[in-house]
Image: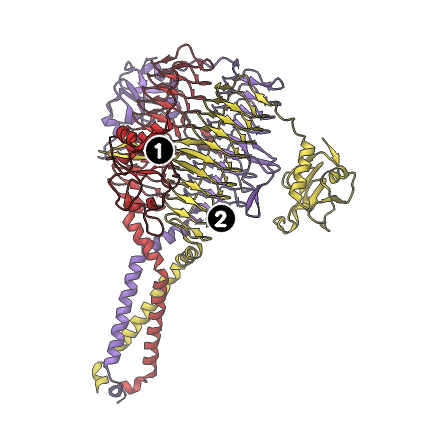
Chain colours: A yellow, B purple, C red
Amino acid sequence: MPATLSELAALVGGRIVGDSQTLITSALPLRDAEPGCITLVDSPKKMESERGRLQILESQASAVVVPAAIDACQLPQLIADDTHVAFAKVIGHLRGVRLDFNCGVDATARIDPSVEIGASTTVMAGVTMQAGVRVGARCKIYPGVHLLEDCQIGDDCVVYPNVVMYPNTKVGNRVVLHAGVVLGADGFGYRQQSGQHVKSSQLGWVEIEDDVEIGANSAIDRGTYGATRVGVGTKIDNLVHIAHNCHVGSHNLVCAQVGIAGSSSTGNQVILAGQVGVADHVHLHDRSIVSAQSGIMRDVEEGQVMLGSPALPSRQKMHEHALVSRLPQLRQDLKNLAKQVAALEARLQAEPNSSRAA
Amino acid sequence: MPATLSELAALVGGRIVGDSQTLITSALPLRDAEPGCITLVDSPKKMESERGRLQILESQASAVVVPAAIDACQLPQLIADDTHVAFAKVIGHLRGVRLDFNCGVDATARIDPSVEIGASTTVMAGVTMQAGVRVGARCKIYPGVHLLEDCQIGDDCVVYPNVVMYPNTKVGNRVVLHAGVVLGADGFGYRQQSGQHVKSSQLGWVEIEDDVEIGANSAIDRGTYGATRVGVGTKIDNLVHIAHNCHVGSHNLVCAQVGIAGSSSTGNQVILAGQVGVADHVHLHDRSIVSAQSGIMRDVEEGQVMLGSPALPSRQKMHEHALVSRLPQLRQDLKNLAKQVAALEARLQAEPNSSRAA
Amino acid sequence: MPATLSELAALVGGRIVGDSQTLITSALPLRDAEPGCITLVDSPKKMESERGRLQILESQASAVVVPAAIDACQLPQLIADDTHVAFAKVIGHLRGVRLDFNCGVDATARIDPSVEIGASTTVMAGVTMQAGVRVGARCKIYPGVHLLEDCQIGDDCVVYPNVVMYPNTKVGNRVVLHAGVVLGADGFGYRQQSGQHVKSSQLGWVEIEDDVEIGANSAIDRGTYGATRVGVGTKIDNLVHIAHNCHVGSHNLVCAQVGIAGSSSTGNQVILAGQVGVADHVHLHDRSIVSAQSGIMRDVEEGQVMLGSPALPSRQKMHEHALVSRLPQLRQDLKNLAKQVAALEARLQAEPNSSRAA
């Protein structure tokens, strides 16, 4: 639904510099904005073009949301305290938002009679829930979700299409599970027996605490006997693997394609960057940070920043990198020194001992 | 359906050396071929066995497709210009191909009344399409595909089972999406607020241009406000992660398990080998190539080949590798030189100054 | 179902030290065990707390399963030869196990009339099986599984929700496929043609031999013309990628997030640790082992242990690591030596040649 800039300013509680009657039909980021668009400059200093000019000065947009007026900018400006909150509101207004799904259970869902579902929860087409499942209130369960026996989900959760929960998975409140997430598959535990791998019992479960979000196609295995656990407020990106018996702490950030091996654990506010690997049975203490693609082989101290595979404290690893990059110079220094020594030797050789001893 | 070699030669427009009446019942690659099989040798020089003999001379196959007659080979040979096209045709004939699916929408699919579906498109069992979805002509939508609100798919696309598209995903023509692909999940964007991670708005969408193919269980997140985009003709392998706001260029090859972090972009004909990681907000220029398992931390110049984690230009990184591998020698050289110097010192020490000064 | 310790001892064939009438209501691992629980100490020596005391001495548990009596432990102890088998039995008794699913085909499954399904096999809601599919006896096919044309599954297999098999996939007996596994997607094979990537034929299939287990969301691509094969007894973890034409041997362990590129192969009892990458067209011989995050670029000898990216024999790579970590010392040694040489030069300089030659 199009709007004038002054209508949008009223919507977000901002003020206008320039023509308040400018008609806005859509909202797009700077690199995509066309005439009729309002766009966003959240941090004027960062947004310089390759030629050093502010990109916004070259934009086709018809208006821009900014945190403070940009003097050089000819476009009408909508000034807002929190530009991201404001821009999101503008998008919501301009693009419109479909009315929410009707609550209720779709006729094609296959729900065991023993299942309990809370008020105002929507269960979409093709969902299955086996015996003993309990789902709280105000949840959205998208098509193709399969909840095996005795799974429990709290209130206000969003479970996107094709999520699978194995038996006894426990999910808290306000949890968001993106499409294709698998919770509770068997851990990768085998005993070697005459050259063959014999499966160990996998009788535990997965427990996801409140306010966790898990990205598309990530997989978290059940514990051997007890829980594999993800703590309150932890956010997990796409294609992450968390093995059996892991205990991930609270308010962690686990970026895409991280893998954590069996029985490892993290404290609170730990950050694992993309493609990090964590070996089994190690602990990362509170507020530790692991850089992208690093490999953690042993415990990490509180607040430590780790880098490399195998990982070292970041400063130490960067020092190593610097030394390796100076190896050509080191080799050259050594060669030069060898020449100096050879010259010295030659010189001593040239002086007959006799003359000296004279 | 079995055939004589001469029937197959007619099929592929090739010529025969040897018995044209040989009966062929199946077609298999060299390492699997049994009597009755026709097999393929696309490049005779490469296909030597461990004992240096041409593998084809030891094959049980009854015939072989070759680009040019192999003199030493006793088997009947079917000579074809493009051996791979010919072998594929032979397989098609011998294995038969099932008649195509009936067009139409399966009775168990759950299609919103507002959805538009083009001519000759097949929608299989258990597919769901929410309000506003549009699918073009001659598409195959396999079982368990879920298209959320307002998704758009062009003509001649193949969408394999259990693909999920979040609202507003846009897919071009002749796109192939393999099983389990997730397009448009929320980006991994949070703001830190008193030790907790508060979710940023994720209001954008995913846009897949014409002739793109995406491998099984890959995930591409929606943009924050605008598009996450994959350009014309780009091919993406299995289990790849592409984060929010990325713009992947045209005719790229993105191999398995690559991860690209938020807001990064690539030019055209870029190649990312397996398990590569790309940091956020970097740009890889046209025709750059990144070797397997490398980590890209900053922009890459046009045509540059990168290697290592963190990545360096390939030649520089290989030089570093070489120097590191020669460290034992370097250490030894240094020790030897130290001994020489010690010997020199000892010699000078042994000669009393007085005698010299005499 | 609660039990006394003596009832549990009878169940597992163990003996008791302490009060045999202790009532046990649940079984949990050491870090989770509360009063009323029986817990497990499988290896007393390993389970020391940070203060060096046995953790079990600080546990709230009401009893413990042990391999041999722990003298210092006041808790009632249930001594069993194989503690893990015993503990699994105890869990089975205490938690109860739901009766097995009814056999038969759910009414919402979409099964082509030509499909053959063996005795006592269960097919759950929303499963689809296309023409020519054959499934053996005593299998469990969970909701949302899609078997495309002519797939074959042996006896006693478990196929978890949302597994997808492309046409002609062949699966042996006693195979376990976890949720989201994709078997038989097209290989990542293209030919470059005037800057564009033209798809090669992908006409082969995937073959999974007996007793294989594959973790959640892993993907194995079909062969180009023949089979991509996984050998007897091999276990594959979550999010693994195996490309077209690979032949994985028997009794391998392939850990999470490993990627194996096209046409590579492994012998028997090979182990690939987490996040390993294997290049295309290489062979890993029997009993070779690749450490986590390593990258294999060429063939690996029998029994060889490999480390690093690019990988070297483990001992050699660790030697390299050690040398790199001693680079600061090497630099210092070189500086010191340079000073020594400079001092020598200065000394020679100070002595006038004339005096010597005198």
Mark sitting on residue C314: none
* Local SS, label 1: strand
Residue with the mark numbered 2? B297
- Dot 1: within a 10 Å radius of its alpha carbon, few (fewer than 14), some, or many (20 or more) residues? many
- Asked if residue C147 lies left or right of residue A143, the reply is left
B2, above or below A96, in the image: above
- Residue nearest the viewer, comparing A172 with A188: A172
Say whether residue A86 is visible.
Answer: yes
Question: How far across and down, in percent of the image, does residue B277 sit?
Answer: 46, 43
Position of the N terminus of chain B by quadrant: top left
What's the chain of the residue with tag 2? B
Question: How far across and down, in percent of the image, does residue C27 sit?
Answer: 36, 34
Q: Residue at x 69, y 34 (%)?
A: A26
> Residue C344's image quarter?
bottom left
Position of the C terminus of chain B by quadrant: bottom left
- Asked if residue A303 lies left or right of residue A186, the reply is right
- Residue nearest the viewer, comparing A111 with A197: A111
The residue type indicated by label 1 comes to Ile
Q: Are marks 1 and 2 on the same chain?
A: no
Mark sitting on residue C24: 1
What's the chain of the residue with tag 1? C
Furthest toward the bottom, the residue is B358
B275, above or below B183, in the image: below
The residue type indicated by label 2 comes to Met
- Residue nearest the viewer, comparing B94 with C304: C304
> Residue A23's image quarter?
top right
